Image (tube, rainbow, N blue to C red):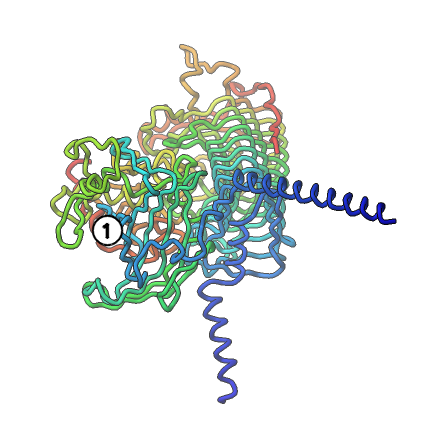
Amino acid sequence: MRTSSLKRSAYQSLVMLFLKTTNYIIIGLWGLLSLVNAHPLDYAKPKLSDYEFFREPISKQISIDSIFPYRISTPLFTDYAFKARFIVLPERGRITYVNEDIFDFPVGTIFIKTFYYPSDFRVPEANWNVIETRLLVHTPEGWTGYPYIWNNEQTDAYLEIAGGRQNVSWIDKKGISQSVHYRIPNFNMCKDCHVIDNVFQPIGPKPRILNCENAYGGTPQNQLEKMIEWNMVENMPPLESIPITAEWDNNHYSLNDRARAYLDMNCAHCHNSKGPANTSGLFLEYHEKDRKKLGVLKPPIAAGRGSGGLSFNIVPGKPNESIFIFRMESIDPGILMPESGRKMVHKEGVALIRDWIESMGGNP
Amino acid sequence: MKNCLPLNHFVFLWLLTNFLFPRFEKEFQTKLILTESGDVLEIPEGTQNLLGTLSLEGKENIIIRGKGVDVSILSFAQQEDGAEGLKIINCKNIQLEHFTIQDSKGDGIKVQDTDGITFVNVKTEWTKGPNSKNGAYGIYPVQCRNVVIDSCISIGASDAGIYVGQSEQIIVKNSEAFHNVAGIEIENSFNVDVFDNYVHHNTGGILIFDLPDLIVKKGQNVRVFDNRVEENNLDNFAPPGNIVSTVPAGTGIMVLATSDIEIFNNRILNNKSVGTGIVSYFMTELPVTDSLYNPYTSAIYIHDNVYKRKKQIPTLKHDIGKLLFIKFGRDVPDIIYDGMPDPKYTDSDGVVFPERNLCIYNNSGSEFVNLEIDINFEKWYTPYFTRFSQDVSRFSCELPPLKEVLTSH
């Protein structure tokens, strides 16, 4: 009796041992597999505060010492939202300069972009309404973007892959009150702009676009220079040799350069030969030289109502006959350009492109 | 009154959340983001109001399934952001079935850069009738491979109801399109079968176009057969500037600058201006600067179609219509050729190589006219004084049939 029960318990413990080990093997395999097949969302943390990017209170957007704040020379217009931008490099990670258009960022890099509205634009440093923070993360499987939405208390922001909408109001620079039903993009909409040639990638932080001054607490300095100081970049050539993309609102640059920079940053992320708007044959990158591809006397392809009854994208000297202006001045979602990220008219941007088209008059 | 307050509060909150972000929209968009290969995403019965585009991106083997056309309805009448109703981009093997998309501000369903896209029993519609304020395209695959559009309905598009652009391996069948500017349009696409469709009461029924300045340069191998193309006499309501705004009201089938086309066994009835038009890009009078673009048509085979046309005045809102009226009154010929053969395929005497000819064979009730625009359209008034050739003998020939299109999904 006793021996058989001993036997049985020995047998049982063997089985248990076997089960346990196979369990570990299975869990191990599962872990490996899930690493291989990681869903892009696996790399996201639920709250912005989980990343520990900022000093408290985090809504002030003061980053910790290792994080590099930056600006870009000509930003994308997003319904007059202010943006705070930062680069987070992984420990000992360094950026490699490839050419004027490409910085190669190491795996682990995170870009932070926070969208906020000061309640009065004439006092931009006070009373912020922080709306959303987008993270662009370089995961082992490539770049991916995560939208975080700030709570009403402004204490933290939460991952929300479906995005959202919010009523936002403010006093503009002229003292006039403004408001918008602000759209926070969903996880897929990040890709509307960031996927080029089927690869998710950053758009703004190109050497030629970072090649401008930033305030740095009162002592303005070139950003690329600052990046060298911080020892962030490898293979950076002498700064003089890196082209500068114009600042759209800085009269120091020519009208043509400012207009082209504006189109480059607001349109060309889709309107390039490898972007989602390549169906249109309209290509608006900074380096594009073919005037037809830039829209000059080019008829639309699939614009539908977007043509506004006009025949060409640009009629030199005639902004009112140019589809560019018609679509930039529209707020109808079936007409307006860019397709996402804008619900208001960017009056200053339209004025710039108007002047540019006007200026082509003498030189059709 | 006081007792009502919590309820009011609740109603207010409910209104707020639903207006800012309708619950269905948020839930369904979340599903579209999290879905994995093999999933079926169900659209429930009833009308769902959405404020923004729904998007599916980078997914494989997904079915989006409603409970039926006009049973599961996604309405975009209150849309405030996004240029489409449903957008699918960079996917593989996607099937859409049994639902309706209404009143999107831009296109109804746009599918881009996707290999394997099947629409079965899907309807896109603008509910307020033909109007230039309607979105451009109903069902709109572009830069796709292996496209099947089966038993779909498209109504009211201000450009084309069913529009396939810059794609390859395409079948459009058993579908219905009406009250659009173009019923079905195939643009810069190759290996296409369009059959068993009912295309009626549009401005133009079936258009096969090649346009310059695009990445996919050349459309070819298009078969259009067993379709009913009737009464496409709707006034053109496309916003000017778009190529379809140049299509005369009363067009049955039109081939523009495309080659290797077979049009057969169709019933092409009572289209008042152009039963079947075969024209080069020069007819649009738009400039061509794309050096890789071929503006001519060639190897067009029109056979065994039934043409019937009651006596009626062609459109007078289009120069071609006016010209046809002056020349032919209410008895306009059915097949109209602009007489511009591809110089690449003509010998030194201007005779077209037989295998690249326009061939018109064994159609019933078809009258023919050759506009020969290179000699007859020198000045704006010259066409009114010439006598157009109606001699079809140069085009009485046969071409080898084109191959059936097989899609791999």
Above or below B218: residue A246 = below
Above or below B55: residue B384 = above
Q: Residues within 10 Å of mark 1 (few under 14, many from 20)?
A: many
Name the foreground residue: B363 vs A242: A242
Q: Amino acid at mark 1?
A: Gly
Q: How many marks?
A: 1
Name the foreground residue: B149 vs B370: B149
Q: Secondary structure at mark 1?
A: helix
Q: Residue at x 39, y 37 (%)?
A: A196
Percent from the top left, x then y, of residue A94?
A: 30, 37
Quadrant into which the C terminus of chain B falls: top right
Name the residue at the right extreme. Answer: A1
Q: Which residue is mark 1?
A: A349
Q: Residue at x 23, y 66 (%)?
A: A126
Percent from the top left, x then y, of residue B128?
A: 50, 58
A185 to the left or right of B49: left
Residue B203 visible in image: no
Residue B378 visible in image: yes
Name the foreground residue: B318 vs A241: A241
Q: Residue at x 52, y 55 (%)?
A: B102
Name the residue at the front extreme. Answer: A2
